[in-house]
Image (spheres, rainbow, N blue to C red):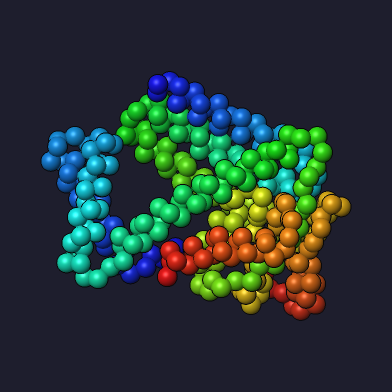
């Protein structure tokens, strides 16, 4: 997974600032490192331009937003799979759906396929030979178009925002 | 307070792992079983390890807990994908309730041509 240019540099600086803060307080505790990281982030958000142009603050917010979205999806669909397991009848409508891909590079496709697989209720099975289609096994198919939209708008758009 | 948080995390985590195991027994075919075994189990282990980290309240243990979760998140989907893909390519039967298979034409096209993958 290759990070966009500029991100590793400022992330490194941010980690270094956190370590400096903890060292100045004389104790490398989780709280000190966390506070140091937050302070460092604020400094870099204001003055990070001194290290050259970087989209680090913006990307970080995107990343947090993405993590929150992903955790929400994980919880929702876990509950759905669990309820199907625990109720006596099968409500599952399994299907293998072709999802057209906008992601192009190996990193983008890999990250997208892994995130889709991590969400309960969807499992990426294969990518077509010309890398234009991702085949996803979903456990609850209500509507093919809605399912495609969910993956494209929910996951792919965010993955591409994060990586491009 | 901390005890309560630890208890909630540990019980929820164990319940999820239990649901995952029951799912492997109950669901109708390999693919739906993969859904049950990989994902709720990952979430369950995450919660259990989080309970451990909160209980210990120690940076070293928290760091290792975070690593365990990270390795889980990296490996579980890859393993699930490889197993699912291998199963579909070798035609492991799907449950009769399966409503759609967009992969079938792609697979027969590949079989028609010499396929190196």
Horizontally, residue B22 falls left or right of residue B61, namely right
Q: Which residue is at 37% across, 33% downward?
A: B61
Give the percent coordinates (x, y) of residue A156.
54, 64
Give the percent coordinates (x, y) of residue A10.
26, 60
Depth order, front residue of B83/A118: A118
Give the percent coordinates (x, y) of residue A71.
51, 47
- Residue A151 visible, this orientation: yes
Count up the numbered dots.
0
Q: Which residue is at 45% across, 34% downward?
A: B50
Q: Residue furthest right?
A: B96
Q: Which residue is at 61% across, 30% downward?
A: B15
- Residue A114 visible, this orientation: no
Q: Quadrant of the N terminus of chain A?
A: bottom left
Depth order, front residue of A73/B75: A73
Horizontally, residue A18 falls left or right of residue B55, namely left
Q: Is residue A64 above or below residue A7?
A: above
Q: Quadrant of the C terminus of chain A?
A: bottom left
Depth order, front residue of A128/A49: A49
Q: Is residue B85 above or below residue B6?
A: below
Horizontally, residue A113 falls left or right of residue A83, namely left
Where on the picture, by quarter, is residue A142? Answer: bottom right
Give the percent coordinates (x, y) of residue A24.
12, 41
Depth order, front residue of A29/A58: A58
Q: Residue furthest left?
A: A24
Where on the picture, by quarter, is residue A87? Answer: top right
């Amino acid at each position: 997974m290759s990070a966009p240019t500029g991100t590793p540099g400022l992330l490194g600086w941010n980690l270094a600032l956190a370590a400096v803060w903890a060292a100045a307080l004389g104790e490398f505790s989780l709280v000190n490192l966390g506070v140091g990281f937050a302070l460092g982030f604020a400094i870099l958000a204001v003055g990070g331009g001194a290290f050259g142009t970087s989209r680090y603050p913006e990307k970080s917010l995107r990343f947090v937003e993405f993590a929150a979205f992903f955790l929400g999806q994980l919880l929702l669909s876990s509950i759905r799979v669990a309820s199907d397991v625990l109720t006596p009848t099968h409500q599952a409508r399994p299907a293998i759906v072709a999802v057209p891909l906008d992601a192009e590079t190996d990193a983008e496709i890999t990250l997208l396929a892994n995130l889709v697989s991590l969400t309960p209720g969807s499992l990426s099975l294969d990518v077509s030979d010309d890398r234009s289609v991702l085949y996803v096994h979903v456990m609850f198919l209500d509507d093919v178009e809605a399912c495609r939209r969910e993956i494209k708008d929910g996951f792919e758009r965010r993955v591409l925002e994060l990586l491009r | 307070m901390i005890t309560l948080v630890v208890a909630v995390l540990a019980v929820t985590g164990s319940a999820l792992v239990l649901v995952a195991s029951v799912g492997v027994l109950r669901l109708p075919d390999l693919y739906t079983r993969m859904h049950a075994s990989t994902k709720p189990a990952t979430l369950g282990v995450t919660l259990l390890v989080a309970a451990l980290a909160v209980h210990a309240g120690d940076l070293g243990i928290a760091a290792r807990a975070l690593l365990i979760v990270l390795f889980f998140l990296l490996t579980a989907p890859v393993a699930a994908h490889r197993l699912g893909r291998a199963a579909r390519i070798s035609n492991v039967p799907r449950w009769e309730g399966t409503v759609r298979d967009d992969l079938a034409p792609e697979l027969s096209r590949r079989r028609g041509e010499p396929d190196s993958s």
